[in-house]
Amino acid sequence: MTPVERARTAFAEVFGGAPQGCWWAPGRVNLIGEHTDYQGGFVLPLALPQGAAVAARARSDRVLRVHSLHAGGTAEIDLDDVAPGTPEGWLGYLAGVGWALTQAGHRVPGLDVVLDSDVPIGAGLSSSAAIECAVAVAWDDLAGLGLDRDALAAAARRAENDVVGAPTGVMDQMASLHGQEGSLMFLDTRSMDIEQVPLELAEHGLALLVIDTRAPHALVDGEYAERHASCARGAQLLGVSELRDVPVEGLTDRLATLEDDLLRRRVRHVVTENDRVMRLVGVLRSGADPRSAGTLMTASHVSMRDDFEITVPQVDAAVDAVLAAGAHGARMTGGGFGGCVLALVEAGSAGAVFNAVAGAYEEAGFDPPTSFI
């Protein structure tokens, strides 16, 4: 059964009667453009087949009651009691959306919700954004708000930033709400302009292999916040509102004006990552062989490893293994400190490439990885 089918079936068992509807939103994987979105930069994600589903029914009061099939329990809160940091745990991702919509001036009812998802949790595939976006669209429909996808993405992001406490950008929610089959979503996170860029891998005999390194990550911690603060400080010292405004040309000279080596490395990652996104989009727009994108993906990983320092041994081992096994390029995807590795491989070699990672993990004593195309 799909998450939608499971949620719909469970609703009658948990709450009695039928839901008013079921809503689904996908997770995402980011081909390139990591930690650029909160500095007005460029990102290039794609929506996944895996997603989160909510079966929901509006209530006459302001109580949000959610049964999570994954967590195996039911939790509830009055929407008027939601605030930054409250509630804690998984309920905050849903309640935070109701709070954000209320803060934006919309009156939303309470809901009875059954939640299910097949997006791996803690793998850097935006399982939280999928949940937020699914319930945002449900609330929009049930309350007749008539909001567009950008407004719903903004509410979902605010839920994650202000209620859950993760200082993320808006890429995850925008990819979940705007992703289209067969394309990448090229997003300018300052203007919020979107271009759907065709991703024609099958025509070139290629595939994207997603490897879950089984090293779970957590964004609500000091490490992520430090990168956020360092980038803001670097922009301030360089006299720009956001690092997106720093050109890659002459970057070395600009970095020399920063006395702090840590700031230099953080800034260098964001500026060069924006450049890599633009170059990769250029490759795909031109209709060139997508294999040439692999070098940019690998360069992105090196930058995340050395300058932004957000990789972990399992992630680096996976990248090394897939490259040694013949992948055209590979990089960590997601916020960092665990999660998934994305590899550009020949379609017929995906199994062998994954086996190389599994062998490297066994030798290193890591938990066995998993993968999907």
Image (tube, rainbow, N blue to C red):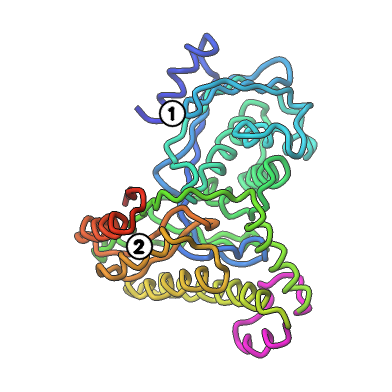
Which of the labelled discs sits on residue 4, or is there none?
A: 1
Q: Position of residue 79 (x, y in %)?
A: 74, 26
Write the start and end of the magenta stretch as one range: 238-258
Q: Secondary structure at mark 1?
A: helix
Along the line of sight, which residue is nearer the eye, 161 or 323?
323
- Dot 2, crowdedness within 10 Å: few (<14), some or many (≥20)? many
Q: Is residue 107 above or below residue 220?
A: above
Q: Position of residue 327 (x, y in %)?
A: 29, 68
| Residue beneath the point at 21% across and 61% down | 349
The count of marks equals 2
Q: In which image quadrant can residue 231 be found?
A: bottom right
Q: Position of residue 89 (x, y in %)?
A: 62, 34
Residue 246 falls inside the magenta stretch: yes
> Along the horizontal axis of the image, is 142 left or right of 233?
left
Q: Secondary structure at mark 2?
A: strand
Q: Is residue 296 above or below residue 90?
A: below
Identify the image quadrant of the N terminus. Answer: top left
Q: In which image quadrant can residue 322 be found?
A: bottom left
| Residue beneath the point at 35% across and 62% down | 343
Q: Position of residue 259 (x, y in %)?
A: 73, 83
Which of the labelled discs sits on residue 220, or is there none?
A: none
Q: Is residue 165 above or below residue 337?
A: above
| Residue that label 2 marks | 343
| Residue beneath the point at 60% across and 82% down | 248
Residue 146 falls inside the magenta stretch: no
What kind of secondary structure does the magenta stretch mostly adopt? loop
Q: Is residue 159 above or below residue 310?
A: above
- Which amino acid is tagged 2? Ala
Q: CA distance from mark 2 to mark 1?
A: 29 Å
